[in-house]
Amino acid sequence: MHVAEMDFEVAAPIRNKLVEMVQNSDLGYLGPFPKAGDAFQAFALQRWGWDLDPSGLKMATDVGVAAVEILKASTRPGEKVLINSPVYAAFFSWLAEADCVPVDAPLQLVNGNWTLDLAAIRREFENGVKVYLLCSPQNPVGRIHSAKELTEIAKLAQEFDVLVIADEIHAPLSWGFFTPYLSVSQEAREIGVTISSSSKAWNTAGLKAGFLVTASESVRMRLSNLPNAMQWRSSILGAHAMVLAFQEGTSWLDETVHKLQENLEHLRLEVAAKLPAAEMFEMDATYLAWIDLGAYRIQDLQQAILREAKVAVVAGSDHGIGDEYAGFIRFNFATSKARITEAVNRIAKLCEGN
């Protein structure tokens, strides 16, 4: 229940396209590829009402590479970058690769919901932070940040001249209403860049293709040092799979999102019945549950679960700067209900001692 991949069959249109390309020996370099921008523009408009300019889309090897290249182009060595913990563990390795230092404005837990602390974000902007790496939907808590929150962030970012990098890779896996950051206001477009891919939602991460989207000339100028080779470092298979996902994969996506909601409800029932001291939280998206097992007071929780229960999960402490999330785990429920039950049973045997 560890790495963020799904135990589901890849959508038929994507599989058929890959077979066709292999049979045609179409495995060379990726050239100019406007199809990706057009396909994502149509998908985003239909799904979220976001009418983006497809010419503002630039290919990248994956979302991580896009983030690192944007950070390198927009920061100096040792510069501070704002994050909101608990957040995707790879954010910290991206920042290290770009020689940046994370500064945290942690999410707040309010009535079972993890929310952005806008006052803390303002304080860090006032303290001189000039780049903000935002995660929406938020991995690992599955929260979609509201249009109101994002609009306020955009106002703050413009006021303090902060570049907002919005990682929206989990957005298609939303059952709540998702609002793209660049769609909320002119301020957001003037001071923001989105990074995303079809790879997470359609389970094709190994095909290596992602993209970044800009919506203003001011941001494009700010990122003018991005390497031209980003385009050519994307996979031709991944790029074509991305187009098919956005064009012909929406029925598969809808079925998958429904299946994920069912699996989440199953996980909640299993945890409530077998781990009564555990806490789960409200979610709007993703297949990654954030579970608080701190009440069981198990040292080195993730390692103990792996060693004793033979279940792989992601350690909560990987999602913050210190040890404040040591009692949490991230649990992937994009699998069968039987496997979810087996994993919870094993963890419960360790935690409850029965």
Image (cartoon, rainbow, N blue to C red):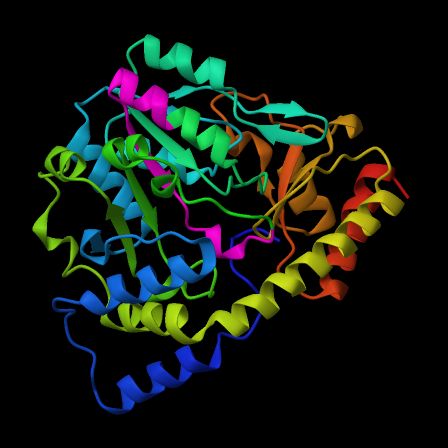
Query: Is residue 155 shown in magenta?
Result: yes
Q: Position of residue 276 (x, y in %)?
A: 87, 37
Judge whether 213 appears above or below 276 on screen.
Answer: below
Q: Quadrant of residue 27?
A: bottom left
Closest to the observer: 175 or 266?
175
Residue 167 appears in the figure: yes
Residue 198 appears in the figure: no
Q: Quadrant of residue 42?
A: bottom left
Residue under the point 22% across and 61% down: 234
Closest to the observer: 250 or 72?
250
Please state the total of marks drawn on the protein image. Answer: 0
Query: Is residue 149 shown in magenta?
Result: no
- Side (left or right) of 119 relative to 298: left
Which stretch appears magenta? 154-175
- Side (left or right) of 110 relative to 64: right
Q: Position of residue 121 (x, y in %)?
A: 43, 18
Residue under the point 78% across and 48% down: 268
Closest to the observer: 326 or 186?
186
- Side (left or right) of 245 relative to 269: left
Residue under the point 42% across and 76% down: 248
Q: Quadrant of residue 191?
A: top left
Judge whether 327 appears above or below 305 on screen.
Answer: above
Q: Position of residue 203 (x, y in %)?
A: 47, 65
Q: Position of residue 139 (x, y in %)?
A: 52, 41
Q: Quadrant of the C terminus?
A: top right
Judge whether 129 appears above or below 228 on screen.
Answer: above
